[in-house]
Amino acid sequence: MAKAIEIRPRPTPPAEEMQRKLDAAPREHADAVLDAYRTLQTLHDTDSLSFVRGLLGAGDEVLSQVVSVATSPQSTRAIRNLLVLTDLLGTVNPDALHRVASALQPMLTSPQPVPAPSLLSTLWRLATSKDVHRALGVGVAVLACVGAAMGPSNTRSAER
């Protein structure tokens, strides 16, 4: 009968295995290594690398300054206001805003100065314009909402 041959592979020491992987790494990951060198060079050219080194050197001091600014009442209010404005802007019809911007653009980018019309003709044109009436209605409605929100019954809830 045949007898089984016992094969025991010789274990490789961890240091030799690590060195073998390091020697093979440049061939296997040449593109990634070259990209890393390019990124490092770009960071160096733009002085971003020294900025990052400075941040790492300052460590806890920079972090404590950022935390103190972020936890201040002004920052908290600013973040809340930004969220409210984002919610408000989300309700604006983009098509209407685009129409307003398109109507304003020629007037704002006009290279020639527009001659000043007489005061009476301007007032008469504005007083009879449906567009001006529409805009005044929106403006008055916004002012009414602001006034109502600033009324005495809402001061306690606005301070929170």
Image (tube, helix red, strand yellow):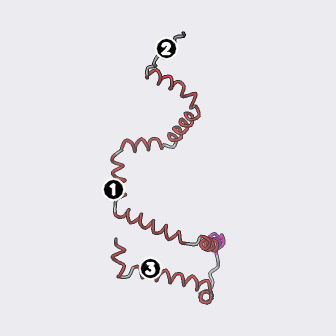
Q: Residues within 10 Å of mark 3 (few under 14, many from 20)?
A: few
* Kind of residue at badge 2: Glu
Number of the label disc, if any, that sits on residue 68? 1
Spatial CA distance of label 2 from label 1 is 68 Å
- Where is residue 113 drawn, in percent x and y? 64, 74
Query: Would residue 141 be counted in the magenta stretch?
Result: no
Quadrant containing the C terminus in the rendered view: bottom left
The residue drawn where x is 55% and y is 28% is 26
Looking at the image, is mark 3 or mark 2 earlier in the sequence?
Answer: 2
Front position in the image: 75 or 50: 75
- Residue 94 image-quadrant placement: bottom right
Front position in the image: 55 or 156: 156
Residue identified by numbered label 2: 6
Q: Residues within 10 Å of mark 1 (few under 14, many from 20)?
A: few
Residue 157 placement, left or right of 102: left
* Above or below for 154 versus 12: below
The residue drawn where x is 64% and y is 77% is 114
Highlighted magenta segment, given as a residue range: 104-113
Number of the label disc, if any, that sits on residue 146? 3
Nearest to viewer (mark 3 / mark 2): 2
